[in-house]
Image (spheres, grey):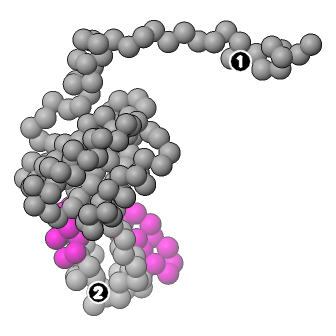
Amino acid sequence: MTVYTENQIGLLNRIAIIFTRRKINIDSLNTSPSEIDSIHRFNIVITESEEVVRKLTRQIEKQVEVLKVYYHTNADVVWQELALYKVSTDVIAEKVSVERLLRENGARAVTIRKDYTVFEATGHREETDNLIKILQPYGLIEFVRSARVAIIKDSEGFNSKLREFERLEPGEEVIENEYLNQGQKVFTM
């Protein structure tokens, strides 16, 4: 699911409650600013039937601050996850095969310290999981994976739809309060 919202405190909690009430587990959740100022984008990954996802979409869209919800399958989006792996620097220095394996899997070093090295890889879940299996025998110290980030393949984007809506139904002109920034001057006697 891709959810476009206003940036409001508590909205994420209200959306999470919609999933909790239906006993649906969220596999991955990413929130970030979108391409539109003051509009945020949530990428939510769940494993459910299309009927359940449609109902969830309608329920989430009932939230006042939610502007639009799209649901899609993995085939409908271009997506990636970022993974970080921490391995002992001694192991990397001693075993040339580890460095070769990392290059073959598209990983690159982001931090090299005396006692550990951190590698970064991006890809699909299966690819980042595979690198865990490869690094386990070499003493994988730590691993973390980001939430999925995704872009809808066959979409002109929410940006164009919002701009068209604003063109057809312009909002009222915002008039700034002339006293807003004067603070104490306005109320002194």
Numbered label attached to residue 43: none
- 92 relative to 160 in the view: left or right: right
Is residue 128 a member of the stretch shown in magenta? yes
Q: The residue under label 2 is which amino acid type?
A: Gln
33 up-or-down from 31: above or below: above
Q: The residue under label 1 is which amino acid type?
A: Asn
Element under label 2? Answer: helix
Q: CA distance from mark 1 to mark 2?
A: 59 Å
Highlighted magenta segment, given as a residue range:
109-130
**Residue wearing tag 2:** 136
**Residue wearing tag 1:** 181
Depth check, front residue: 58 or 180: 58
Q: Are marks 1 and 2 in contact (CB under 8 Å)?
A: no
Residue density around tag 1, few if under 14, some if 14–19, many if 20 or more, within 10 Å: few
- 146 relative to 55 in the view: left or right: right
Q: Residue at x 16, y 71 (%)?
A: 126
